[in-house]
């Protein structure tokens, strides 16, 4: 049995939706400003040098300045567009390998949604739901789209996880995720290749050669590719996303899925939840699964 004082303490741990949205927008504004100085500035310099060099050999028909400004500002404008007018995440789905649901899968999704609508007649309808061919139950939301795994649709946890992802979709979370992803044009093109699944990681010394010139080129491309400002602010973003996971769980609980979501977390996520080492800053973007289950069980 939970007293009113205990409920009040739990409520104080969850910021109001307006405050949480303001925090997310503030973090995005700081990230956007950082990308304007780091990413856009480096892109402008590289594009101007490249256009000037090529223009001296082959007429481009356009000055180096306009080309440099276009390269510098295009990702920033693309990110703002994703925040203000999110789309269906075509590139995101292509990278994931998500596809449209089959007729049987579409029926399972519609049945899950009908169950959730019974708990909230004003439930926002996601524009598109796609399927990822993964045997493990999982879900994700970004922009106006939700991706559910094939393993989830074959389990009894579909309504619970769908309700959780709708918590992200119906809030600012999916828009922020879309806008942040658009700020990163590329990663680390000159860095060491990532080992394939099951392959042994290469020795660190194998990729230490190249000298100062290669190191400068790598950092210049890394800055120009975007994402460095978010990496610098990652501890703050991680704290925000941990609070948003609790909020999405609360949204699922409000739709009557607290018990089923807690069971899903206990069966599929708790066994693989790593410890969160936080000597100074906690960089984990999800709270401990055990604490999520505890809060769901207390509702």
Image (spheres, rainbow, N blue to C red):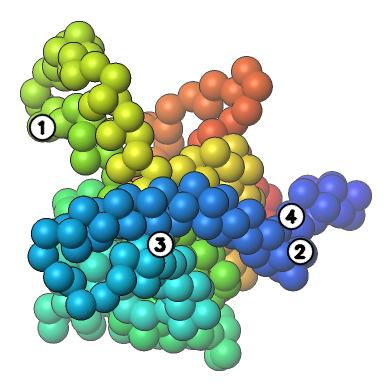
Left or right: residue 15 versus residue 217 is right
Kindly state the secondary structure of the residue where label 2 is placed: helix
Q: Decide if residue 248 is on the left or right side of residue 17.
A: left
Residue named by callout 2: 19
Marks 2 and 3, the one that precedes in the sequence: 2
> Do the CB atoms of the residues marked 2 and 3 lie less than 8 Å apart?
no
Residue occupying image coordinates x 54% and y 51%: 37
**Circle 1: is it few (<14), some (14-19), or many (20+) Cα within 10 Å?**
few
Q: Residue at x 59, y 37 (%)?
A: 235
Between 95 and 169, the residue placed more toward the observer is: 95
> Residue tagged by mark 1?
196
* Sequence-first tag of 2 and 1: 2
The answer to which of marks 4 and 3 sits earlier in the sequence is 4
Which residue is identified by label 3? Answer: 72
Residue mark closest to the camera, 2 vs 4: 2
- Of all residues, the one furthest to the front in this rendering is 56
Q: How many neighbours does mark 2 have within 10 angstroms: few (below 14), some (14-19), or many (20 or more)?
A: few
Foreground mark, 2 or 3, reads 3
The residue that label 4 is drawn on is 14
Q: Position of residue 55 (x, y in %)?
A: 19, 63
Q: State the separation of the CA atoms marked 2 and 4.
A: 10 Å
* Residue 111 locus on image (x, y percent): 32, 81
């Amino acid at each position: 049995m939970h007293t009113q004082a205990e409920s009040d303490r739990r409520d104080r741990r969850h910021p109001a939706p307006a405050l949480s949205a303001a925090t997310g927008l503030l973090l995005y504004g700081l990230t956007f400003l950082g990308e304007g100085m780091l990413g856009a500035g480096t892109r402008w310099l590289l594009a101007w040098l490249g256009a000037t060099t090529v223009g001296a050999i082959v007429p481009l028909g356009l000055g180096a300045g306009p080309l440099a400004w276009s390269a510098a500002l295009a990702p920033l404008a693309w990110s703002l567009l994703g925040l203000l007018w999110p789309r269906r995440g075509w590139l995101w789905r292509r990278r994931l390998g998500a596809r449209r649901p089959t007729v049987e899968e579409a029926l399972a999704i519609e049945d899950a949604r009908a169950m959730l609508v019974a708990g909230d007649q004003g439930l926002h309808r996601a524009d598109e739901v796609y399927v990822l061919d993964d045997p493990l139950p999982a879900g994700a939301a970004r922009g106006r789209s939700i991706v559910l795994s094939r393993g989830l649709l074959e389990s009894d946890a579909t309504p619970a996880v769908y309700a959780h992802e709708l918590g992200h979709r119906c809030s600012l979370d999916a828009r922020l995720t879309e806008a942040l992803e658009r700020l990163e044009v590329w990663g680390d093109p000159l860095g060491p290749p990532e080992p394939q699944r099951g392959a042994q990681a290469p020795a660190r010394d194998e990729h230490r050669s190249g000298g100062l010139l290669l190191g400068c080129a790598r950092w210049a491309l890394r800055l120009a590719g975007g994402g460095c400002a978010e990496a610098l602010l990652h501890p703050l973003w991680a704290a925000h996303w941990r609070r948003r996971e609790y909020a999405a769980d609360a949204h699922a609980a409000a739709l009557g899925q607290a018990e089923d979501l807690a069971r899903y977390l206990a069966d599929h996520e708790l066994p693989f939840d790593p410890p969160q080492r936080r000597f100074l800053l906690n960089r984990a973007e999800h709270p401990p699964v055990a604490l999520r289950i505890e809060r769901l069980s207390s509702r």
